[in-house]
Image (cartoon, rainbow, N blue to C red):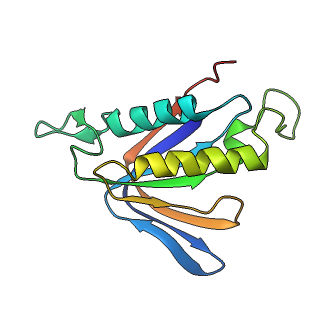
Amino acid sequence: MIGLLQRVQRAHVDVQGNRIAEISHGLLVLVGVQRGDGEFEAGRLLERLLGYRVFADADGKMNLNVCQAGGALLLVPQFTLAADTRSGMRPGFSAAADPGEGSRLFDYLLQQAQQHRIEVAAGQFGADMQVSLVNDGPVTFWLEVKPRL
Protein backbone atom coordinates (compact mmCIF):
# COMPACT_ATOMS: atom_id res chain seq x y z
CA MET A 1 0.00 0.00 0.00
CA ILE A 2 1.29 3.41 -0.94
CA GLY A 3 0.81 6.74 0.81
CA LEU A 4 2.06 9.92 -0.80
CA LEU A 5 1.83 12.34 2.11
CA GLN A 6 2.01 16.08 1.86
CA ARG A 7 2.16 18.43 4.82
CA VAL A 8 -0.49 21.05 4.12
CA GLN A 9 -1.74 24.34 5.48
CA ARG A 10 -5.14 23.39 4.04
CA ALA A 11 -6.63 20.98 1.53
CA HIS A 12 -10.02 20.01 0.16
CA VAL A 13 -11.71 17.62 -2.25
CA ASP A 14 -14.57 18.50 -4.59
CA VAL A 15 -16.73 16.06 -6.56
CA GLN A 16 -19.04 17.46 -9.24
CA GLY A 17 -18.65 20.94 -7.83
CA ASN A 18 -19.52 19.91 -4.26
CA ARG A 19 -16.98 20.06 -1.42
CA ILE A 20 -16.95 16.58 0.13
CA ALA A 21 -13.89 16.85 2.39
CA GLU A 22 -11.74 19.58 3.86
CA ILE A 23 -8.99 20.02 6.42
CA SER A 24 -6.81 22.82 7.62
CA HIS A 25 -3.30 22.18 9.01
CA GLY A 26 -2.36 18.52 8.60
CA LEU A 27 -1.57 15.80 6.10
CA LEU A 28 -3.09 15.18 2.69
CA VAL A 29 -2.40 11.55 1.83
CA LEU A 30 -2.92 10.13 -1.64
CA VAL A 31 -3.49 6.38 -1.15
CA GLY A 32 -2.72 3.67 -3.69
CA VAL A 33 -3.70 0.05 -3.14
CA GLN A 34 -1.61 -2.64 -4.80
CA ARG A 35 -2.37 -6.26 -5.63
CA GLY A 36 -1.57 -8.37 -2.60
CA ASP A 37 -2.34 -5.62 -0.09
CA GLY A 38 -4.55 -6.50 2.83
CA GLU A 39 -5.62 -5.22 6.21
CA PHE A 40 -2.10 -5.73 7.60
CA GLU A 41 -0.61 -3.38 5.00
CA ALA A 42 -3.39 -0.82 5.55
CA GLY A 43 -2.83 -0.92 9.31
CA ARG A 44 0.92 -0.58 8.94
CA LEU A 45 0.54 2.35 6.53
CA LEU A 46 -1.79 4.11 8.98
CA GLU A 47 0.68 3.53 11.80
CA ARG A 48 3.39 5.15 9.72
CA LEU A 49 1.17 8.06 8.62
CA LEU A 50 0.17 8.88 12.18
CA GLY A 51 3.69 8.48 13.54
CA TYR A 52 5.75 10.03 10.76
CA ARG A 53 7.50 13.11 12.11
CA VAL A 54 7.10 15.88 9.51
CA PHE A 55 5.97 18.83 11.64
CA ALA A 56 8.32 21.32 13.26
CA ASP A 57 8.98 21.33 16.98
CA ALA A 58 9.86 24.48 18.98
CA ASP A 59 13.37 24.38 17.49
CA GLY A 60 12.10 24.21 13.90
CA LYS A 61 13.12 20.56 13.42
CA MET A 62 10.77 17.94 11.97
CA ASN A 63 10.21 16.06 15.22
CA LEU A 64 6.41 16.06 15.61
CA ASN A 65 3.87 13.74 14.04
CA VAL A 66 0.44 14.89 12.86
CA CYS A 67 -1.23 14.05 16.19
CA GLN A 68 1.40 15.90 18.24
CA ALA A 69 1.09 18.91 15.92
CA GLY A 70 -2.70 19.01 16.32
CA GLY A 71 -3.19 18.38 12.61
CA ALA A 72 -5.85 16.59 10.60
CA LEU A 73 -5.69 13.79 8.05
CA LEU A 74 -7.25 13.88 4.56
CA LEU A 75 -7.13 10.49 2.81
CA VAL A 76 -7.69 10.49 -0.95
CA PRO A 77 -7.78 7.27 -3.00
CA GLN A 78 -5.54 7.37 -6.06
CA PHE A 79 -5.02 4.11 -7.91
CA THR A 80 -2.51 5.68 -10.31
CA LEU A 81 0.11 5.55 -7.54
CA ALA A 82 0.37 1.81 -8.22
CA ALA A 83 1.23 2.40 -11.89
CA ASP A 84 4.22 0.74 -13.52
CA THR A 85 6.14 3.52 -15.28
CA ARG A 86 9.41 1.68 -15.89
CA SER A 87 9.10 1.54 -19.66
CA GLY A 88 7.20 2.94 -22.57
CA MET A 89 5.15 6.10 -22.72
CA ARG A 90 1.96 4.81 -21.09
CA PRO A 91 1.60 3.61 -17.50
CA GLY A 92 0.55 0.04 -16.77
CA PHE A 93 -1.84 -0.75 -13.94
CA SER A 94 -1.38 -4.49 -13.48
CA ALA A 95 0.13 -3.86 -10.01
CA ALA A 96 -2.96 -1.97 -8.81
CA ALA A 97 -5.58 -3.82 -6.79
CA ASP A 98 -8.87 -4.47 -8.56
CA PRO A 99 -11.46 -1.76 -7.84
CA GLY A 100 -13.51 -3.82 -5.39
CA GLU A 101 -10.53 -4.73 -3.25
CA GLY A 102 -9.07 -1.25 -3.55
CA SER A 103 -12.32 0.29 -2.33
CA ARG A 104 -12.60 -2.21 0.54
CA LEU A 105 -9.06 -1.54 1.74
CA PHE A 106 -9.38 2.23 1.39
CA ASP A 107 -12.57 2.07 3.49
CA TYR A 108 -10.77 -0.11 6.04
CA LEU A 109 -7.91 2.41 6.25
CA LEU A 110 -10.41 5.24 6.70
CA GLN A 111 -12.35 3.40 9.42
CA GLN A 112 -9.15 2.59 11.29
CA ALA A 113 -7.99 6.22 11.06
CA GLN A 114 -11.31 7.45 12.44
CA GLN A 115 -10.70 5.45 15.61
CA HIS A 116 -7.77 7.70 16.55
CA ARG A 117 -7.90 11.07 18.27
CA ILE A 118 -7.49 13.04 15.08
CA GLU A 119 -9.79 14.79 12.62
CA VAL A 120 -10.12 12.58 9.53
CA ALA A 121 -11.67 13.45 6.16
CA ALA A 122 -11.69 11.49 2.91
CA GLY A 123 -12.10 11.65 -0.80
CA GLN A 124 -14.47 9.33 -2.66
CA PHE A 125 -13.22 6.08 -4.15
CA GLY A 126 -13.78 5.89 -7.91
CA ALA A 127 -14.96 9.49 -8.25
CA ASP A 128 -13.55 12.17 -10.52
CA MET A 129 -12.16 14.39 -7.75
CA GLN A 130 -10.62 17.83 -7.80
CA VAL A 131 -8.06 18.01 -5.02
CA SER A 132 -6.74 21.39 -3.91
CA LEU A 133 -4.00 22.00 -1.40
CA VAL A 134 -1.51 24.46 -0.07
CA ASN A 135 1.60 22.36 0.49
CA ASP A 136 3.44 23.55 3.59
CA GLY A 137 7.18 23.60 2.92
CA PRO A 138 6.80 21.96 0.46
CA VAL A 139 7.05 18.71 2.40
CA THR A 140 6.16 15.52 0.51
CA PHE A 141 7.09 11.90 1.31
CA TRP A 142 6.41 8.56 -0.36
CA LEU A 143 5.61 5.80 2.15
CA GLU A 144 5.15 2.26 0.95
CA VAL A 145 4.24 -0.92 2.76
CA LYS A 146 5.04 -3.77 0.39
CA PRO A 147 2.49 -6.59 0.17
CA ARG A 148 3.49 -9.66 2.18
CA LEU A 149 2.94 -12.03 -0.76
The image quadrant where one finds the C terminus is top right
User: Horizontal placement of 110 versus 87: left or right?
Assistant: left
Q: Nearer the viewer, residue 101 or 130?
A: 101
Q: Residue at 27% across / 42% down in the picture?
A: 55
Q: Is residue 29 visible?
A: no
At a point 28% along the width and 51% down the height, the residue shown is: 117
Looking at the image, can residue 27 be seen?
A: yes
Above or below, comparing residue 132 to residue 114 in the picture: below
x, y percent for residue 67: 26, 45
Q: Is residue 84 left or right of residue 123?
A: right
Residue found at the very far left of the displayed protein: 58
Which of the two residues, 66 or 36, is positioned nearer the viewer here? 36
Q: Quadrant of the N terminus?
A: top right
The image position of residue 90, as x and y in percent, is 87, 41
Is residue 76 found left or right of 70 in the rendered image?
right
Up-down relation of residue 125 to residue 16 (above or below): above
| Front in this rendered view, residue 139 or 35 | 35
Q: Return the residue found at the far bottom.
A: 17
Please state the horizontal and vertical placement of residue 7, each as a whole percent of the image: 38, 48
Q: Residue at x 52, y 76 (%)?
A: 19
Q: Choose top left, top right, bottom left or bottom right for residue 96.
A: top right
Residue at the top extreme, as displayed: 149
> Which residue is found at the position 36% from the left and 39% from the top?
50
Residue 88 to residue 16: above or below: above
Q: How many numbered marks appear?
A: 0
Rendered image quadrant of residue 59: top left
Q: Which one is nearer the viewer's eye here, 24 or 111?
A: 111
